[in-house]
Image: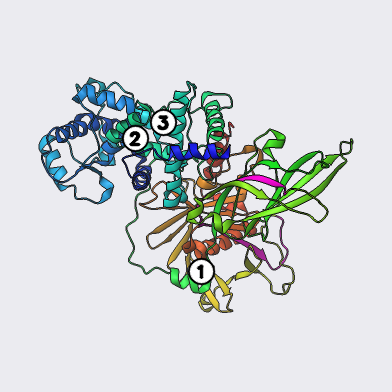
Amino acid sequence: MEMELQLEWNEAQKIVINVDLVSAAKLHLEFLATLDRNRWLYEGPGLDMAIYRYYSCWLPLLAKLSESPFFEGPLVVPLDCEWVWHCHRLNPVRYKTDCEQLYGRLLDNHNVVSSLKGISEMETEVIWKRLYPNEPYDLESARALSDNIHVQILESENCSNYDLVSAVKRQSPFFYQVSRPHMNNELYLEGAVARYKGFLHLIRRNRERSIRSFSVPTYDIDLIWHTHQLHPISYCKDLVDIMGKVLDHDDTDSDRTKGMKLDTGFSGTTKLWEEMYGLRYWRAGAMYRGNAPSPLRICPYPSNPASKKADTFRMDQKIIHLPETKVLEVMLEIIGIRNLPEAHKGGFFVSFSKTHPDRIFNAKKKLTIFSESGEKQVAYFQCEPSGHLLLELISQSSHGLPISKSVEVLGSTAFSLEDLVCPASKLTMEKWLEVVPSTKIKVLEPICIRVAVSVTTPTAAPYVFHMVRSRAFSKISCFFPLPGRNQYAKNWTYVIDDDGDEVISLQMRNSKKSKRMSNSTLQKEVIGISKSGETHSLAELVGKEWLLLDSYWSLQLQTCSGDEGYLLELVGGSRIVKFFPGQRLDYEHKHCAKRRNQDDFMTAIEFSSEHPYGRALALLDLKCGVINVKEEWLLLPGTITAFILGDILRKEGYSSLLSSGNNLKDKNTSTEEANACNE
């Protein structure tokens, strides 16, 4: 049976696709990331103008080039037109029909490149200006959003009645699902291409067997499917060769409610895939992530010109230096069991843990066995990509009483996580593992369990710190006494990592400079003692502004009532980091039942030309004194900011942060109510 399943998978891998899908997928992701920095093209006047330019300028220009090439270099498509063209091509049957109706042939992307590739646009721009003297080649957001023009697209002669506004609306959320770093990894993408071929072969087999099904891809497969469709002629030719017709791409269903078309389609696809290939359909890092977080801004943040100040990151490393930790996502399922001793009756389950727990995963959890329970249970967790995962087979029998159950460990097995992330493993394993029996168990044949596991490629793990004060204080504080410390060392805060090792000690005190100055208000400063024992002056309060790390960074409280909702702003060089109350963007909690008071948290958001709508960099848990930081350059300034913030909260309370803008908290509360979970 297993041989037949393997042959079916081998048959799927024989499918020929005339596009380098791995390289094309990387360009695809780069393009989506660029669009996410230009969200004015997602809706409204900017999108209307882009659609107008697409039909009136880009498609006619593309048709001219395909009919009779009039220059050697590639045509460079403007960003706005490329986005509309992108969404049009993701309905391949409709795009083909529209092209044939409007221009008599399918318009391809051959000899066309994205504006992101850095190829000179000069030749294309010259031709564009000659053909469309009144329409600029580049569409600037300011012009698109300020022109008081109602674009009547449907009145154009060379125009389809396809609803491109709705098509763009459907495609805009896709980037969030495929935006994590592992999706851009070559090894991960190679696996996605193999699974895409398996997906196409599954649909082909269903057609041959007259099985009616709505096939729903996982997001790694969908990324490759989209990438293939962006090459119209190759896609049409390949799909006709594979299954005799052009496969349409139905993205009109987005309702994931249980029992609806998308949900039942995915369940059906999972069942057929696993029956045909004997492999799990789920894949680590490729499953639905939920809705994208609530945006912080509607308009992009104005880019900050690069500063000429020298970067202090190397100096920071001398004060705080931590080794980088990697993390990977893991999905695990126990599929079956064989050669069980006849004497053992009752239920069986598998307990899993790491042989040497790491700082990310140090728990012991359990999974049912699908062949025994009849219910599919898949574990999802994160851990460091090292060591072994230990699986213990456990027998659980009942003695007839509701609370009386005996548990017996029958044996254990383990597999290496290092082996899983090697290229040869293709980031997945599905096989029978022999269970080494415990000393009490006697078996004639080895007990085996069928294990399926999938991992992502490793990515950088966030840095996690705990801030612990040297003495007890008010209950509203988040820092508690550190056992074994000198209780007479007053007002020191110790920053420790997850292993309990001290990273740096911090103290707030009156500035020596202010003491030397007569008739002046006492100013404050933050002193730090590094792990090596060196003392550093880390920050100084000058007026209402904190200057950090030799004045490289400036930290200020929000002093006026505004509509942005941030409470503090940290500026250094070309970097701008704003601190917002609550869990925001990537840290947004999506399950209301477990949601803590949002006043307990503050999120650090960086705004830049690369991230004009904000990028979540750190989460401060004000109640527990925990700091979660994604980027190493923010470690020291972020820790100092958290310490200063903690000092304000202990002495003045949370309301002091809002005294200059009382509407901010009310605004945040009303936003939370409006965004209440509907799940």
How many discs appear?
3
Height in image: 412 above or below 500?
A: above
Q: Nearer the viewer, residue 413 or 622?
A: 413
Which mark lies nearer to you, 2 or 1? 2
What is the CA distance from the residue labelled 3 to the residue labelled 1?
48 Å
Which comes before the other along the chain, label 3 or label 1? Answer: 3
Instruction: Give how far across and how far down residue 26 sits, in percent.
Output: 36, 47
**Residue 165 location (% of width, % of height):** 34, 28
Tell me the magenta residue range: 446-475
Residue holding disc 2: 229
Amino acid bearing label 2: Gln
Graded by Cα atoms within 10 Å as few (under 14), some (14 to 19) or many (20 or more), the crowding at tag 1 reads many
Q: Nearer the viewer, residue 180 or 676?
A: 180
- Horizontal side of 631 relative to 227 (left or right) equals right
Can residue 234 be seen here? The reply is yes
Q: Position of residue 489 (x, y in %)?
A: 69, 74
Label located before the other in sequence (2 or 1): 2
Q: Is residue 462 visible?
A: no
Badge 3 is on which residue?
170
Q: Residue at x 81, y 48 (%)?
A: 408
Label 3 CA crowd tier, 10 Å (few <14, some 14–19, many 20+): some
**Is 388 placed above or below 401 here?**
below
Relative to 341, say whether 201 is above or below: above
In this figure, which residue is indicated by the disc labeled 1?
539
Horizontal arrangement in the rendering, residue 448 relative to residue 632 (left or right): right
Q: CA distance from mark 2 to mark 1?
A: 54 Å
